[in-house]
Amino acid sequence: MTKILVVGSINMDLVVRVPHPPAPGETVLGGDFETFPGGKGANQAVAAARMGAEVTMVGRVGNDDFGNTLIQGLVDNNVKTTHVVKDHEAASGVALIAVAEDGENLIVVASGANMALSVEDIHKAVDLMRETDLLLMQLESPLDVVSAAVELAHAHQIPVVLNPAPAQPLSKTLLASVDVLTPNENELALLTGEDDLEKGVQSLREWGVKTVVVTLGSKGARVVNDSVDQFLPAYQVTAVDTTAAGDAFNGALAVALAEGKPLLEAVHYGMAAGALAATKMGAQPSLPTRSAVEEFLTRESPAVD
């Protein structure tokens, strides 16, 4: 079985439906309130597990009710939690999410215990790193931890997929050690200082990123490496909640790549998983199974403008 190691965030999502995103200073009366296990790291771990991989999570939660629920949620989704630490000083991370009628969302994160994740936590997982097929990461953890994990994976010749979200500047040294970088358009612009997509992709390639996959939401994805230079149109679905669509994409992409699937096929797996996730409410509850993704791929064609 393919082994995926995920280092990243574990949050409880506090979600309310709203008729439209609030403008600055505006109060919007919302609808139903729900809580869902979330966090980009945990979401991507669950996404990868539902795609059939053996997944281990490295992260931190608080020693609180949310923390207990979040760990149990990972266990229930067949994610190994031996390296999820209960922090006795910081509270579990939470995300406040407003979901509009068209499925788009506004998210504010209180990181809590996620920002207590340490380089020592990474080095305690070195035996896992030696045995894993791929490292999957995001940026809801301290950057020194992200760098340490990428360096360790690089030293053991483990491929790294980095989802640079939420957007923040990264060093060229770190980027050069990344095998597959999956920014969206905003993250690409912040990383490179280029508003033009093609110039941004070219900058990342010049800095040493081996493969760039820019996710373009309902427009599809832009995929570039030494042998591939292609735009892939998106699959057409009716979005209900896009909260974890990107995480579904990254989890499915990572598993497909670790299994040795060609890059474009792997991206199609990711896009199908992301499309399916957008059709359901919640983060982890929306993440599709392998069978759902493969059935979707057999019957759906990407949207064509």
Image (tube, rainbow, N blue to C red):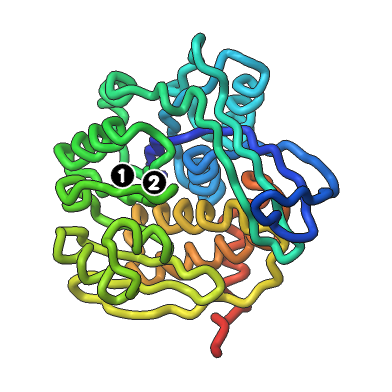
Q: Which quadrant would the C terminus be assigned to in this image?
A: bottom right
The secondary element bearing badge 1 is classed as loop
Q: Picture quarter containing residue 257?
A: bottom left
- Residue 252: x and y, percent? 47, 56
Q: Residue furthest bottom?
A: 305
Marks 2 and 1, the one that precedes in the sequence? 2
The secondary element bearing badge 2 is classed as loop
Q: Which quadrant would the N terminus be assigned to in this image?
A: top left
State the residue at coordinates (60%, 32%): 94
- Residue 247: x and y, percent? 51, 51
Q: Picture quarter containing residue 209?
A: bottom left
As drawn, the label of residue 2 is 2
In the displayed structure image, the side of residue 266 where residue 70 appears, left or right: right
How far apart are the two marked residues, 2 and 1, measured between alpha carbons? 6 Å
Q: Picture quarter containing residue 150?
A: top left
Q: Residue furthest front?
A: 25
State the residue at coordinates (44%, 66%): 215
Q: Nearest the camera: 140 or 81?
A: 140
Look at label 1 and name its amino acid: Asp
Q: Nearest the camera: 273 or 25?
A: 25
- Residue 64: x and y, percent? 62, 15
In the displayed structure image, the side of residue 264 where residue 60 appears, left or right: right
As drawn, the label of residue 64 is none
State the residue at coordinates (43%, 33%): 56
Q: Residues within 10 Å of mark 2 (few under 14, many from 20)?
A: some
State the residue at coordinates (70%, 54%): 22
Look at label 2 and name its amino acid: Thr
Using the image, determine if residue 243 lies above or below residue 302.
Answer: above
In the displayed structure image, the side of residue 212 where residue 55 appears, left or right: right
Marks 2 and 1 in Cβ contact (< 8 Å): yes
* Residue hosting label 1: 133
